[in-house]
Image: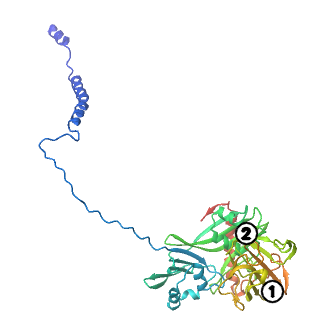
Amino acid sequence: MHAQKTDILAQPPSRPGVARRVAVGLALVAAPALTVLTAFGIAPGAAVPGIEQARVEQAIELPVLEPHPNPPARFTTQERVMRGDTVAALFERLGIRDARAMEFLKADTTGRAIFRQLVPGRVMQAETGPDGELHSLRYFLAPTSLLEVMRAGESYTARSRAVAEPPRIFYRTATVRSSLFAATDAAGIPDAIAMQIARVFATDIDFHTELRRGDRLAVVYEMIYDSGELVAPGRILAAEFVNDARTYHAVLFTDDEGGDTYYSLDGSNRAKAFLRSPVEFSRVSSGFGGRFHPIFRNWRAHTGVDFAAPGGTRVIAAADGTVVAAGNRGGYGNAVEIRHGGSITTLYAHLSGFARSVRAGSRVRQGEPIGFVGATGFATGPHLHYEFKIGGVHQDPLRVALPKAEPVPARLREDFTRVAAGARETIARVASAPPARFE
């Protein structure tokens, strides 16, 4: 029994698991080789016995390719309504030369609203063809109401609808380093809003000569969106401008007739009876007083102020008045003279041309275009020569005392006080915030 156990123990133990692993390993090693051989066995291009091959040639007719005509050119333009504007004047600035469109607006019940509701500051947009034909027109009758005119074949359709979205309110602060527009660009304020800032504060600040490095502004304004798309800049609702350590405020107030006016927080009108500068985007190139004349090469009295601006820049009336003369006046070149109340007259010289409605005897409103910057007469380059006379005596247009316009009417004083209090709080929060863009 012991010997049997010894024999059993002396036999080498069987290892079926090891043998199985060895077999599997050999199979894995051999598999790639077999695969390679199989791949070479069915390589492309090898002749396949038993299958007949033939070459087939067939003509295929190709379509005739013709050049696709370019779609008609379309031009989209936008203009802001100025004081004294007419629909005809806006059409001219928008490049619309379409008599049928004008006749349609006059005859259509919905379209004729545009003639009754031209409000300074509102926006008109137009899409025109290469010959000035009108394809579409959009005009904001109010911040929440839009008039749309669309071309339909040889005629037009008009409809008035509510703007899908309320105006979005934006809050911005900016610091002047070199110019107003450089400051507003750096703060992300649109140019259209920057122009409104200049107009609102122009009665107290001469943006050509009185800006100082470090001046600050805070502004609350609207931007109008329709179906998620920005369609137009809105209005300034409130603003503060600190110029040379003096602080000025403006708040928009809508009266009981729907008219918008900017007032200071105390209710005094931001507007003055006269504008300091009758040219936008300009600079003073020659001041009032004696100067060395660039053409006659001698010292002469300079009885006005010269504003340098690109040729064709619009010149606007400094105040309401009546045109005394509009035509060529020798060394003044093309010139317009306007008589205002209180024995005041203003003169605008070296114009390249006149606005269509300007002629002797016509009435003009403050801010209404009366001509365009040029270099007619004794001029070395495009600029506006502007004179201001009281009782026939020349005054410095940049320094003469200008009267204020009417303050808030007594009947609306309570409503204005409430609006002004809200504007004061909002501007204080915006002005105290670090320079940033937020909405």
Snapshot quadrant of residue 19: top left
Residue 384 lies, in percent from the top left, at 74, 76
- Using the image as rendered, state which of residue 115 and residue 285 is in the foreground: 285
- Using the image as rendered, state which of residue 105 and residue 55 is in the foreground: 55
Residue 177 lies, in percent from the top left, at 73, 61
Residue 258 lies, in percent from the top left, at 62, 84
**Amino acid type, mark 1:** Ile
- Residue reaching furthest to the left: 50
Q: Which residue is mark 1?
A: 344
Q: Quadrant of the C terminus?
A: bottom right
- Using the image as rendered, state which of residue 53 and residue 112 is in the foreground: 53
Q: Is residue 3 above or below residue 402?
A: above
Q: Which residue is mark 2?
A: 241
Residue 30 lies, in percent from the top left, at 23, 28
**Amino acid type, mark 2:** Phe
Residue at disc 1, secondary structure: strand
Snapshot quadrant of residue 97: bottom right
Question: Horizontal placement of 369 versus 166: left or right?
Answer: right
State the colouring used for the structure image.
Answer: rainbow
Residue at disc 2, secondary structure: strand
CA–CA distance in space, label 1 to label 2: 30 Å
Question: Horizontal placement of 297 versus 274: left or right?
Answer: right
